[in-house]
Each structure stands twice: as structure tokens, then as C-alpha cells.
């Protein structure tokens, strides 16, 4: 059995499954907008609802944009599970 961080044990047979959300965002170079990279940010805390994810995603995106805004721009982002297809759709 796994231990809970606050004490006690987790019984996998009775513990409900939780989906942990991540922040997935597509960034494109300012100088070459066709060159884009999919990036992932995993949160330090458990984010288990879309609302929680969006509330913490905005400051994360602003911090990333401030740090990289001279070369990259955020084209789009989403909260959720990993994308099934990392490739570019044509």
C-alpha cells in the first residue's frame, strides 16, 4: 500500500481514480511563426479539476511569456491529459 503525504495508507481498491491535469501549450518562434514546439508544464500541487487547472495556468503562462517573449509566443494552450498526437495536423 502507498502512504498518503499527510499520513495513513492508500488502498487502491477503494481509492477513486483521479486525473491529474497538466498545462500543454504550443509556442511558436516570433522570427519564424511556422517553427512551433509543444511544451508541457506539470504542476507541483495536485490539480484535479479543469477549473483548478485554468486558475493556476494563467499565472504560469504569463511567467513563461515574460521569460521567453522576445523569441517565442504562445499560440495556444489547454489544461488536461497528455495529447494523443504530438504531431502537426496538415
Image (tube, grey):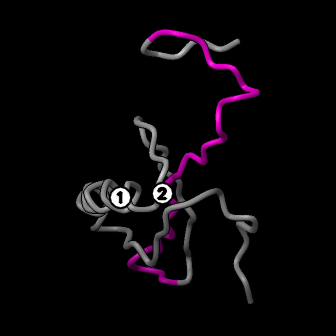
Question: Residue 86: percent from the left, percent from the top?
Answer: 71, 66
> Is 85 positioned to the left or the right of 70 in the image?
right
User: Residue 43 versus residue 16: which sits nearer the camera?
Assistant: 16
The stretch in magenta equals 7-33
Name the residue beneath numbered marker 1. 57
Left or right: residue 45 versus residue 67 is right
Residue 15 quadrant: top right
**Residue at point 47% right, 49% down?**
41
Q: Is residue 16 left or right of residue 55?
A: right
- Is 87 on the left-hand or right-hand side of 68? right
Q: Quadrant of residue 9?
A: top right
- Residue under label 2: 23
Point out the image quarter for the N terminus. top right
Kind of element beneath mark 2: strand
> Does residue 23 belong to the magenta stretch?
yes
Q: Is residue 11 above or below residue 82?
A: above
Contact (CB < 8 A) between labels 1 and 2?
A: yes
The percent position of residue 89, horizontal first and vertical second, equals: 73, 84
The quadrant of the picture occupied by the C terminus is: bottom right
Secondary-structure class at tag 1: helix
Amino acid at each position: 500500500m502507498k502512504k498518503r503525504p499527510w499520513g495513513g495508507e492508500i488502498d487502491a481498491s477503494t481509492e477513486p481514480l483521479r486525473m491529474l491535469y497538466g498545462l500543454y501549450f504550443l509556442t511558436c518562434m516570433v522570427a519564424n511563426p511556422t517553427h512551433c514546439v509543444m511544451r508541457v508544464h506539470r504542476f507541483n500541487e495536485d490539480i484535479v479539476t479543469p477549473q483548478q487547472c485554468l486558475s493556476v495556468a494563467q499565472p504560469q503562462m504569463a511567467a513563461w511569456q515574460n521569460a521567453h517573449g522576445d523569441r517565442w509566443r504562445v499560440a495556444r494552450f489547454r489544461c488536461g491529459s497528455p495529447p494523443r498526437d504530438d504531431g502537426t495536423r496538415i
